[in-house]
């Protein structure tokens, strides 16, 4: 057993997860949005999306890393759908009011938040680009030296990125109660603007892929 390689894979997974976890992006924006508009459970459920999106993608990318590279049309479709979804979520941010007690006690809000988190990740073309063009080939290369190395990398990455985003949700939730209404709406407006910019970025990415076809 190549212990050094396994530990190096774990370290790489943790480091990348911390960077990706705190880096502004569609999922982090959605975590903040759901925590502010719902409750802590909504934010935490949204933060768990990677285990249901990245997990299957890791397995698929390990065996079919060249699929996306050979079929840019797949990324075009994902990007356009993602742009539409992010635009819708972004526009809604400007109409969200501070949650009432009834909303906070509504069990289904967390499930809806989880669904939005999963959709946010599934419709993010960057997730596919990373795992199919970078993560997949890296894991495929290391499996020859140590079969457990890619597993260690994937597991450490997913668990750590979820924990980082959960920490962000908890921090936002703690700040929310003492947040003035105008600050609350300003933060949500910033999330809305960010989501609209992500939508524009998705469309730009789709255009570059169309030109490559």
Image (tube, rainbow, N blue to C red):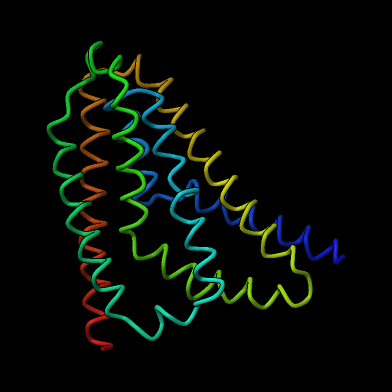
Residue at image x 27%, y 72%? 205
Pick the front one: 192 or 8 = 8
Horizontal placement of 204 versus 8: left or right? left
Question: Percent from the top left, x then y, of residue 133?
Answer: 48, 76
Q: Nearer the viewer, residue 208 or 53?
A: 53
Q: To which quarter of the image does residue 90 belong? A: top left
Total tally of numbered discs in the picture: 0
Q: Quadrant of the N terminus?
A: bottom right
Which residue is more in the foreground, 142 or 63? 63
Q: Quadrant of residue 103?
A: top left
Q: Quadrant of residue 135?
A: bottom right
- Residue 17 percent location from the top left of the image: 57, 52
Q: Residue at x 14, y 36 (%)?
A: 94
- Residue at the location (26% across, 25% down)? 184
Q: Is residue 45 above or below residue 12?
A: above
Left or right of 97? Residue 18 is: right
Q: Position of residue 21 (x, y in %)?
A: 50, 47
Whether residue 45 is situated above or below residue 50 in the rendered picture: above
174 to 62, vertically: above or below: above
In the rendered image, the residue lying farthest to the bottom is: 213
Closer to us: 197 or 149: 149
Left or right, 134 with reference to 201: right
Residue 62 x, y percent position in the rendering = 56, 71
In which quadrant will I find the C terminus? bottom left
Q: Residue furthest top?
A: 101
Q: Residue at x 71, y 74 (%)?
A: 142
């Amino acid at each position: 057993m190549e212990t050094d390689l396994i530990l190096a894979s774990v370290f790489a997974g943790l480091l990348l997860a911390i960077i990706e976890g705190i880096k502004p992006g569609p999922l982090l924006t959605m975590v903040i949005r759901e925590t502010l508009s719902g409750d802590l459970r909504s934010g935490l459920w949204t933060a768990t999306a990677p285990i249901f999106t990245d997990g299957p993608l890791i397995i698929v990318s390990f065996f079919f890393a060249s699929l996306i590279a050979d079929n840019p049309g797949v990324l075009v479709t994902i990007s356009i759908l993602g742009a539409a979804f992010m635009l819708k979520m972004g526009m809604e941010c400007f109409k969200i009011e501070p949650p009432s007690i009834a909303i906070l006690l509504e069990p289904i809000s967390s499930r809806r938040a989880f669904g939005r988190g999963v959709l946010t990740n599934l419709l993010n073309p960057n997730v596919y680009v990373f795992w199919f063009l970078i993560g997949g080939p890296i894991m495929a290369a290391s499996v020859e030296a140590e079969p457990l190395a890619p597993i260690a990398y994937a597991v450490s990455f997913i668990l750590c990125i979820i924990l980082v985003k959960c920490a962000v949700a908890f921090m936002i939730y703690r700040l929310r109660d003492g947040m003035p209404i105008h600050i609350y709406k300003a933060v949500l407006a910033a999330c809305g603007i960010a989501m609209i910019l992500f939508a524009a970025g998705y469309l730009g990415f789709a255009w570059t892929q169309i030109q490559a076809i």
